[in-house]
Amino acid sequence: MSVGFLRYYNKSQPGAKLRSMFAVASMYNLDFFHFSPENVNTEAKTINGMFWSKEMVEYVRKEVPYPDIVDDQFNFRSKDRELYLELKEHCYLTYMPLGTKSAVFRKIDTTDFSKYLIKTYHFRDMDVANMLVGEKYIIKPDNGGRGENIYKLERISQDAFDLHFAGETRQMTLEELAQEYFDLFETRYIAQPFLDSTTIEKNPFDIRMHLRRGREGKWDTHLIYPRIGSSAGVVSNVATGGAVSLNHKSFLQQQFGDDWKRIFDELKHIADVFPKTLQKKYKKLIDSLALDVGIDRARGNELKFFEVNTYPGVQTYPYHSSEASIHFYMHLLNLKKEGKL
């Protein structure tokens, strides 16, 4: 039984993540290979996959039948839709899309974790004209990631708004906002009240939690770390230059004084219980989650969920992530042998 790792990949040699995947797979004698969409022959039902050869001590290409499992967590392109449907018919695909941000929040709202939700609106349902002076909202795509295309809207007077985006601020009237942005925002954007999740130095931050299944399909806390943006930014955004701290305990101790232990324990509870709770809302196995948690200083350091996504991109500690993935593949293969997948 075999596992194919599907990604768009144009390098001549695998990067750190893929090298670590090959290393761990080899250690556990898992038949594992990498491929991209162009490597698939749908007529012959074969794939020209990249394998690691222990004997030749190099990467080699081999034509092989479709694998039992495909890790298909890649940036889906519309032109590959037919390929996706073809593989879905013959292989088990690991990717489990959770849905839009608002849809995921609706599912969480029916659980014990509803207290962590930030009130969320479709922008088209917002009454921007009647925002109070001093009110602030984060406006972001309902379906998107990596902290991109995020705006902060603040009413600064009865006749003016500040719109913060990409490190710049524009002062606009309601009419100017409507003319330039409402068509965009009303189609696919949501709005949330601004959360004062900032450091002592007034930099925006959140706590990123990487949670994933590993050995025997059990959930494991892969990584928890603060992501810190600049004071000019709207949110913490590593994708566009933010920073991370790899010791969330020290960060909490430095930032929250005597309250750090309560926050630390609450984060641990979320990591331990939330994935199992969310899984009950979906039929297919969720293999990994990225949970972004804010801490609202203005409301007694309340914890709130900014976003919940599947399959976090892991650049730090790729070996740790790869080992969990390989263990999960082996669990899926066992389930398939038993006819339970």
Image: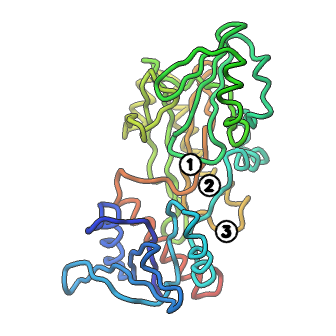
| Residue 274 or residue 285, whichever sits in front | 285
Q: Amino acid at mark 1?
A: Ala
In 3D space, how far apart are the residues under numbered discs 1 and 2 (Cα atoms)?
7 Å
User: Which dot marks residue 314?
Assistant: none
Q: At 54% from the left edge and 63% from the top edge, which residue is drawn?
A: 77
Residue underneath mark 1? 271
In 3D space, how far apart are the residues under numbered discs 3 and 2 (Cα atoms)?
13 Å
Secondary structure under tag 2 reads helix
Q: At 67% from the left edge and 20% from the top edge, which residue is drawn?
A: 176
Q: Earlier in the sequence, mark 3 or mark 2?
A: 2
Place of residue 321 in the rendered image (x, y in percent of width and height, measured from the top left): 41, 60
Secondary structure under tag 1 reads helix
Residue underneath mark 3? 284
Secondary structure under tag 3 reads loop
Place of residue 228 in the rendered image (x, y in percent of width and height, measured from the top left): 43, 31
Q: Is residue 249 above or below residue 232?
A: below
State if disc 2 and disc 1 touch (CB < 8 Å): yes
| Neighbourhood count class around disc 3 (C-alpha, 10 Å): few under 14, some 14–19, many 20 upward | few
